[in-house]
Amino acid sequence: MKKILTLSLVMSFGLIVNAQPPVGDAKPGEWYGEKISTEGAVSITDVAAKLGESGEVNTKIKAKIVDVCPKKGCWLKLQVNDSTTAMVKMKDYGFFLPLAAKGKTVVIDGEVKTKVVSVAELQHYAEDAKKSKEEIAAITKPEKEIRVLAKGIVIVE
Amino acid sequence: MRKWLVVATLLAGIIVSLSFINSTTSLRRIYSQAPDKWPKPFVDSGIQWNELGLLPESPLQPHLDSLKHLIELGKVLFFDPRLSGSGKISCATCHQPALSWTDGKERSVGHAGAINKRNSPTIQNSWFYKRLFWDGRAKDLEDQAFAPINSESEMHSDMRELPRNLRAIKGYAALFDSAYGDPAIDPDRIAGAIAAFESTIISRQSKFDTFLMGKKNALSNEELRGLHVFRTKAKCMNCHNGPLFTDNQFHNSGFHLNGNPENDKGLYNVTHKEEDIGKFKTPSLRDVMKTGPWMHNGIMTHINDIILHYNKLSPRPGRTDTEMLYLSNKEITDLTSFLQAISSPPLEFKPPALPE
């Protein structure tokens, strides 16, 4: 009972300070952050292959967005290859992308880094994502993660 | 004939000196009425304005009891430097209670001494804004809270990793449990609690509020004349209107080209509309004398310089010409006195004990 009461109070606060995802269509040509050209953009797969275990490079990458942080548009996930994704954060948190950007191909100008994510970290992320115990236990190998700090993003298609 | 002349001169002299003495007295009489009977403010045509008024309470005021634990959690998170990548920067680093919840700096200093782009605004009355940040890129306080935590140049943390770091601090489980009904920690709960706490932070009552509540001598003659100048000749109410002295809109008041190595385009960064270049959020003027240095980039260190800036360029949103206000030195002094009368020294605020 106490739980229900507390939850309903918290929800009523949510109504007072209402949160919404950023709106927008994310049509081709729309841009966020610094205005950048798409010229000279390299596929993220190629960049990732060149970077190796712990590289860092400033470049323009072309990639497909597979996920947008659902509530605040605060990060993006890009497809690198079948088994790898890249996390994108926005420089200075100076701009946000709308949810509609999910599934779009974009060119991003920014800093690309690789980081090895430990088994413990991966398991914690899986826990946060409410994965089952079996799924969490199945994580046994560290993963290479690509991180992008974006200055500017433009929707290509 | 000469007698008449002397009498006339004397009479004229008396009338002139009486009207001089009485101008402040009659102003006091006029402004002692309810605000809806005050003279109409000088605003440009097409401006939507609200009359100045009593300091509004926090929207959470009626719920302070029921939301006690949520607000308490938000307060702890707000003051906890372990929310940052370095473990040294908390929200309160740039929003210090003793400095009216600002940092007193031109531009805020973030991770590893990084100088950020803009001035850290007070969180007082921030519940009122329809959009957060100087450029309005966040829709609400929860949305806003994500940004400094995540930003590599501010708190240099990561909202994905933060819940795990907080879980490692045993005391947080109980705090989240009492706030939300179970001990789960996730980014939305973190931001929600911080937003709830921030929504409770408002200005203190000012002399102007005491005056509005019927104490007609609460404002000095200077302050009273300043109120009149504020509402009329200085045209401040073109943007700074309503009980919180802000229209909740964005305007270009000619500061975007100054002081910043990169020309900061403000609202344009969010909307990409050309007419929005150089527009920034109208800040509340409540406690303005305690929240300097001023403007989005903190380049103004003397309030007089800001008034002089507007004296030369009439503060009209979307101004295309350079109409002057012709404020006299006395009017400028009176205006500054009024700004003092809507500013109160910060209350002593005891930071919470942080969980182990």
Image (cartoon, rainbow, N blue to C red):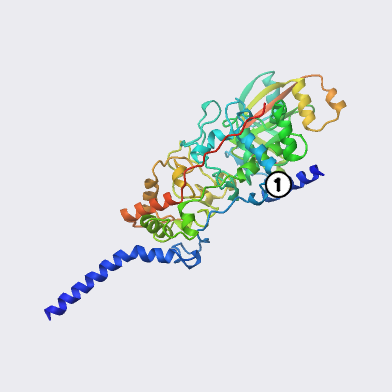
Residue drawn at (54%, 30%) of the image: B110
Q: Is residue A98 above or below residue A80?
A: below
Chain to which mark 1 belongs: B
Which residue is most to the bottom? B1
Locate residue A135 relative to residue B181 in the image: left or right: right
Which of the 4 quarters of the picture holds residue B80?
top right
Q: Nearer the viewer, residue A69 or B84?
A: B84
Q: Position of residue B189 (x, y in %)?
A: 71, 38
Q: Is residue A150 above or below residue B325?
A: above
Residue A156 visible within the image: no
Provide the residue designation for mark 1.
B66
Which residue is most to the left? B2
Quadrant in which the N terminus of chain B is drawn: bottom left
Locate residue B295 relative to residue A98 in the image: left or right: left
Q: Position of residue B84 (x, y in %)?
A: 61, 29
Q: Position of residue A127 (x, y in %)?
A: 79, 29
Indicate the secondary structure of the residue bearing disc 1: loop
Q: Nearer the viewer, residue A40 or B267?
A: B267
Locate residue B151 relative to residue A52 in the image: left or right: left
| Mark 1: amino acid | Ser
Which of the 4 quarters of the picture holds residue B234?
bottom left
Which of the 4 quarters of the picture holds residue B74?
top right
